[in-house]
Amino acid sequence: MEIWHRVTFNRYDAVNEEIENLGITFKKTPGLQGYYLITFEITESDHRWPRVAELVQQKDRGSLVDTIFTKDEILAAEWIRLIPIFEQGYPQPYTTWVTNPINYKDHCPACGTFQQATSFRLKKEPHLGKQDFMSLFWTYALFCTPHVFDELEAHGIRGYEKWDAIIHKTALPSQKVSQLYVPTVANPGLVRAEDLKREICSACGFTKYYPHMRGVMYLARTAVVSDVDILQTYEWFGSGHSAYRELLVSNRFAKLILEKGWRGLRLKVVELL
């Protein structure tokens, strides 16, 4: 497991010389009237990280945090989080979907919790390149190619439904992707939830946790359902007006993903207690 940071400073932080002396390669993005940002990536195992962490604290700068797990760590876990990382296009109709997501029901406009009722609509056929999985901007919905569905069926993966993705202009199903819809929701079980940042929606009353980016996610063993290979967490995550449930996959589903080398997603370890 490796904790990764993307760090950003600006001109007025006056850290350029020290960052250069540390031997860190950074990207400099110019702005108006001599203003600029410097951005770089660093892991906590890097010997330079303690000094960078001091500078982040001194200058009151945040950093984007993520966790990368090794293949062996993933294969040793009973359950794994599946994270869509390749986003392609927006749900349609684009101009009104945020305020009126037509394929949702029981949608809370304040915090974003929802129940998907009908298929997503795409502007056009997506350009996947070498990606096997994709999601849409503004959503956490998971889509994949026909050959992925063929493999899932051949290997007896349980717990998903294949939903059409509709091309908005023609109202016909996409020929390149379908949604891998996950109907099963886990039991409540987020461990150490009291230590996690969260907000309670004043409109609907749901609790929503900030995105889980650092380290292992801990769940009670009673949370997972044993007769499926993919399910959603009971708990909601996100910030502002967006919300999503994490996707959990079994060890055998994760093993298939790694064996096939499927792209467009990331796997993160879950520990059951």
Image: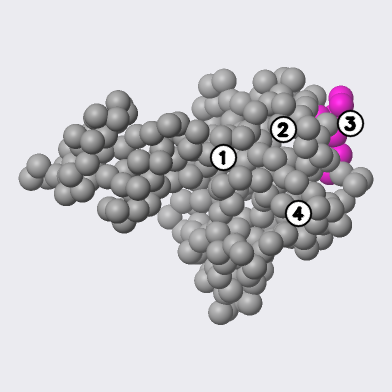
Report the residue marked by disc 3: 156
Residue nearer the viewer, 179 or 221 = 221
Q: Which mark is residue 219?
A: 4
Q: Is residue 2 visible?
A: yes
Type of amino acid at the residue the image marks with label 4:
Leu
Q: Is residue 102 visible?
A: no
Is label 4 in a helix, a strand or a loop? strand
Q: Do the residues under discs 3 and 2 have CB atoms within 8 angstroms?
A: no
Q: Do the residues under discs 3 and 4 have CB atoms within 8 angstroms?
A: no
Q: CA distance from mark 3 to mark 2?
A: 20 Å
Is label 3 in a helix, a strand or a loop? loop
Q: Which mark is residue 74?
A: 2
Q: Do the residues under discs 3 and 1 have CB atoms within 8 angstroms?
A: no
Q: Which mark is residue 131?
A: none
Residue nearer the viewer, 30 or 26 = 26
Residue 133, relative to residue 245: is it above or below? above
Type of amino acid at the residue the image marks with label 2:
Ile
Q: CA distance from mark 4 to mark 1?
A: 17 Å
Q: Position of residue 232 (x, y in %)?
A: 74, 52
Residue 157 in the magenta stretch? The answer is yes
Residue 243, relative to residue 255: is it above or below? below
Q: Residues within 10 Å of mark 1 (few under 14, many from 20)?
A: some
Q: CA distance from mark 3 to mark 1?
A: 30 Å
Q: Position of residue 211 (x, y in %)?
A: 56, 54
Q: Do the residues under discs 4 and 1 have CB atoms within 8 angstroms?
A: no
